Image (cartoon, rainbow, N blue to C red):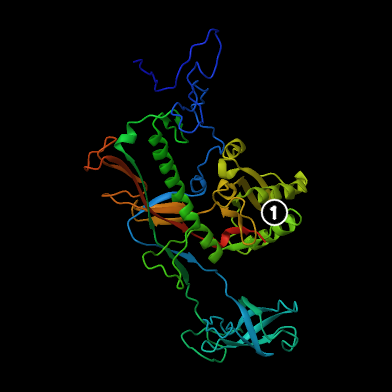
Amino acid sequence: MASTLTPTFGSIIPSQKQELLNSNYLQFNSDAAGDTNTFAQQYLPEIYEQEVERYGNRTLSGFLRMVGAEMPMTSDQVIWSEQNRLHISYDGCTLPSTLTIDLETNGTTIQNVISPRATVVVLDPTTGLEAKCLVTDSDTTTGIITIQPYTVADLTGFTATGLKVFVYGSEYQKGGSISAGATGANTGTQYLSVDPQFTQYSNSPIILKSQYVVSGSDMAQIGWVEVATEDGTSGYLWYLKAESETRLRFEDYLEISMIEGEKVGAASAITTGKGTEGLFAAVSARGNVNVGFTAADGLADFDAILKNLDTQGAIEENMLFLQRQTSLDFDDMLAKLSLGSAGGTAFGLFENSEEMALNLGFSGFRRGSYDFYKTDWKYLNDASTRGGAGGNNSVEGVLIPAGTSTVYDQILGTNIRRPFLHVRYRASQADDRRMKSWLTGSAGGAYTSTLDAMEVNFLSERCLVTQAANNFVLFKGA
């Protein structure tokens, strides 16, 4: 009895001519039901071994390295104090009568330090009226001062609320003396000492963690795609790419957390964390916010920002980190100015080297008495973060002063100059938590447990210190 040959890969029927037929060659790409002779392609395709970098450099960190510094600390909290203004001024005052002024604002008790015989300017923002007056009596209990205007009989015509009062000097009679220590109403001889006050702020570090795990079997398996990442990792082991991207992502989180961080509020239900104050939160609470900056009226808006900076620290050099549209608005604003009116700028922040500034991505211009260095901020343009969000209240840029403050560093034991914006991380002689990474498991060179895998661990503990936030400006969409 003749046997029947049934090959595993299909039946081959000879042909008298040399030609390709369905019956005389093996098919590896058949979609027929039940056909076991299938394969993606019998011919080797042309393979590009490297991935196409369609998003360019995907990392977002680098902002804080441009504008600040990182310094160690050994506590759960960092506290700093900031000076208050030097001169005596009161806003939101009321006018009980035409010859008395209540320094209290909306019924809030304040410290009255205006002495009798002081000379003050009373400003009415509503009507534009002003009067220079001599203080004849000052009550430290009620906050009411009695005044006598120099050029008019009284303050008739002034608005009853919203007045501003500031001291510009004093006037005493010949042979008079100043007595101190009395409180309450007086006869015009008391001098009130002004004790300097400072405002205290604090922030607490948060702990950031991340981990990547790969099994020992996958570590021993190669792929056909060559790994190439931003940090220079290369090879045909796919886990190298995953581990590298986990590290890069964690390094970005270290910076983004310092920018976006929020403290836990009273209305929050969070009980297992305290949060931390990031840059946006600090500037929103203690700094300046500009809404709706556009090219159409950019010069007028920008000059208003300059006038506001004049009322603050008036720091000469400032850096602008902007999203694309706001950066173009600044370009359009500058394009309307001639070189003579815009003025040049000395790149003092970059050792007076324009080339150095340009290499770092900054372009400079001068307006009024201020120098500005402008650059695009990738974090505000990246679609995976704030890029493309737009709309009301969207963050479109930030102005950061380039000033420094002199403080005593307990760790270094000396006075050092610190940028207004800097990062504090936990560190001591026993442990440095600035950026820790370690391996655990039993693969990849780690022999710490019986787990058949390699665990790559990352950890950091840090917070941001935003000093003198009154000199910062946050640009937001209208």
Camera-side residue: 278 or 115? 278
**The disc labelled 1 sits on which kind of residue?**
Gly
Q: Is residue 326 left or right of residue 250?
A: right
Q: Is residue 150 above or below residue 337?
A: below
Measured as percent of width and height from the top left, residue 346 is found at: 63, 43
Q: Is residue 299 left or right of residue 422?
A: right
Measured as percent of width and height from the top left, residue 295 is found at: 74, 53
Q: Quadrant of the C terminus?
A: bottom right
Number of labels in the image equals: 1
Q: Residue at x 46, y 27 (%)?
A: 39
- Quickly name the residue at label 1: 368
Q: Residue at x 66, y 84 (%)?
A: 161
Q: Is residue 58 above or below residue 25?
A: below
Q: Is residue 56 left or right of residue 430?
A: right
Q: Quadrant of the N terminus?
A: top left
Measured as percent of width and height from the top left, residue 45 is found at: 52, 23
Q: Residue at x 26, y 50 (%)?
A: 430
Q: Is residue 118 above or below residue 23?
A: below
Measured as percent of width and height from the top left, residue 403 is found at: 53, 53
Give the quadrant of residue 93.
bottom right
Camera-side residue: 306 or 277? 277
Camera-side residue: 288 or 104? 288
Camera-side residue: 407 or 325? 325
User: Does residue 346 appear in this view?
Assistant: no
Q: Secondary structure at mark 1?
A: loop
Give the quadrant of residue 464.
bottom left
Give the quadrant of residue 293.
bottom right
User: Does residue 196 appear in this view?
Assistant: yes
